[in-house]
Structure formats: C-alpha cells, structure tokens
Amino acid sequence: MKALKIGNLLAPVPIVQGGMGVGISLSGLASAVAEQGGIGVISSAGLGAIYNDYSKDYRKASIWGLREELRKARERTRGIIGVNVMVAMSNFADM
Ligand SMILES: Cc1cc2nc3c(=O)[nH]c(=O)nc-3n(C[C@H](O)[C@H](O)[C@H](O)COP(=O)(O)O)c2cc1C
C-alpha cells in the first residue's frame, strides 16, 4: 500500500479510522491506530456525557473531555491523530 499524504502529514499505512462516538473511538483506539502508522480519529460525539463529572454543562464537559482525550492520545503516540466533530446537524449557532 502506498503511504497517504495529507498536506505535510504522511501516514505510512493509508487507513483513516472512522470516528465513532459515545466512547468508542477515544484516545485508546485512535492512538493504537496512529502507532501502527494509520490515522487515528477521536470522535467528540458524546464526550459531554462521558465527562459529566467535570461539568453538568454538556458543552463545557465536551470541550474538557476532548482536551483530555487529546492529551492521553499524545502520551501514547506521536503518530497522526484526527478529531471528528459533528457540528453540521446541531450547535452551529454556537460556532
Ligand atoms: C458505533 C459507531 C459510531 C459512530 N460514530 C460516528 C461519529 O461520532 N461521527 C461520525 O462522523 N461518524 C460516526 N460513525 C460512522 C463511522 O465513522 C463511519 O463513517 C461509518 O461506520 C462508515 O464507515 P465505512 O465507510 O468505512 O464503512 C459511527 C459508526 C459506528 C459504527
């Protein structure tokens, strides 16, 4: 398989792992994919529910959770990590 080049990034394994919300593709899966040379994707969908001990405000908890997941992913890999943010259907007024 040919490496996948996106801008200045080069993934030796041309696989982009799909973002899967509600706790499925978080730092664990994404960093494992990135460590193997693919592109690991953290889904932001549902982070506000997963991190609701940080805040009962769903948006604040989501932002906190995404930072946490990115931090944890970076502890595990220097490979390529992407973030999946589904804003097309909701919350667009906040952006
Ligand atoms: C359990 C599950 C959760 C998913 N959550 C998201 C999500 O949060 N964001 C998103 O863009 N796609 C989500 N998807 C869609 C996948 O990322 C992917 O686009 C879809 O499974 C089709 O992949 P394929 O084209 O490789 O078959 C989810 C899929 C599954 C199975």
Image (cartoon, rainbow, N blue to C red):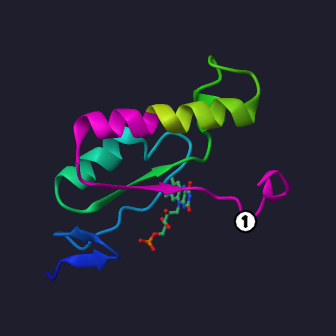
Which image quadrant: the C terminus? bottom right
Crowd around label 1: few <14 · some 14–19 · many ≥20 (10 Å): few
Q: Is residue 14 left or right of residue 61?
A: left
Residue 63 within the magenta-colored segment of the rendering:
no
Q: Nearer the viewer, residue 38 or 24?
A: 38
Q: Position of residue 94 (x, y in %)?
A: 81, 51
- Assess whether residue 90 is covered by the magenta stretch: yes
Mark 1 beta carbon near ligand 1 (under 8 Å): no
Which is more toward the observer, 23 or 53? 53
Q: Which region is colored magenta?
A: 69-95
Name which residue lies at 62% across and 17% down.
Answer: 53
Residue 4 on image: x %, y %: 25, 77
- Image coords of residue 51 (percent x, y): 59, 26
| SS state under label 1 | loop
Vertically, is 60 above or below 73? above
> Which residue is drawn at the image coordinates 31% and 39% (left, top)?
74
- Residue at coordinates 70% horizontally, 59% vertically from top-left? 87
Taking the image as shown, residue 55 lies to the left or right of residue 20, namely right
Relative height, residue 22 to residue 18 (above, below): above
